[in-house]
Image: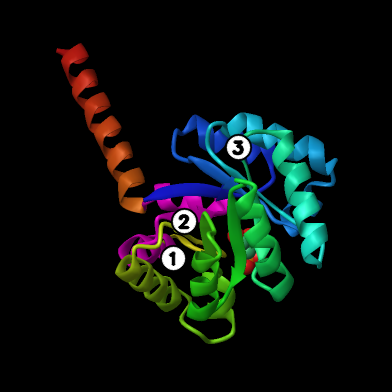
Amino acid sequence: MELFLDTANINEIREALGLGLISGVTTNPTLIAKEKVDFQERVREIAKLIYPGPVSVEVLAQDAEGMLKEAVEYSSWEPNIVIKVPIIKEGLKALKKIHEKGIKTNVTLVFSLNQALLAALSGATYVSPFVGRLDDVGHDGMELVSQISTVYNMYGFPTRIIAASIRHPLHVIQAASVGAHIATIPFSVLEGMIKHPLTEIGVKRFLDDYQKAKEFLEKK
Ligand code: G3P
């Protein structure tokens, strides 16, 4: 099980890397737009920071030719760039061609087992089921991750499952339990995974006890 950071924010990536916990980054057009920076510059900066880990960058074109063109361009920027392609008909056409060029792909906006199956059959390197967005509309997002894991294992598909649209630490526990290879998480979720009130109380109590014992010995 690996953790990727779902962000285009450099400070968050630096901090997570400092913790030694993340092995990749995923972005999407919304996350990049939030940063209000030059797209290519930011992608290259992220790719250099996370190298040799992958950074997923999403195509914006809506037609296969345009997607392929973007894929070829983005993947020439840095060696660890993975092309994120939405699972629409044009995306599938593009995936085949991108795959033939030896470029790694992350099939995104996956909301059903059929879509995940098509992604694997298209030779996707990664598939990204969106857990939180399914939960948002009253479906069990993690159940989809579990189904994908079962079917991929049954047929030996090498496509790696990224549990995406992760909203809280419990999603990470569940993703790990149902066989996701990776969870891509916002920085706030990473922080939430670290924190536990009993750890904080425990650290404080140990320090207080040690201090008390030290003062006692000093007074003797
Ligand atoms: O990895 C996909 C993710 O960025 C989408 O998350 O929270 O916008 O559903 P969210």
> How busy is the neighbourhood of tag 1: few (under 14 within 10 Å), some, or many (20 plus)?
many
> How busy is the neighbourhood of tag 3: few (under 14 within 10 Å), some, or many (20 plus)?
many
Which color scheme did the rendering employ for the protein?
A: rainbow
Q: Which of marks 2 and 1 is nearer the N terminus?
A: 1
* Residue segment shown in magenta: 170-196
158, above or below 147, in the image: above
Residue tagged by mark 3? 80
Q: Does the magenta stretch include residue 166?
A: no
Q: How many labels does the image show?
A: 3
User: Looking at the picture, which amino acid does disc 2 mark?
Assistant: Ala
Q: Earlier in the sequence, mark 3 or mark 1?
A: 3
What is the CA distance from the residue labelled 3 to the residue labelled 1?
27 Å
124, above or below 131, in the image: above
Residue in the picture at 56% in, 35% down: 15
Q: In what quadrant does ligand 1 lie?
A: bottom right
User: Looking at the picture, which amino acid does disc 3 mark?
Assistant: Asn
Q: Residue 171 carries which label?
A: 1
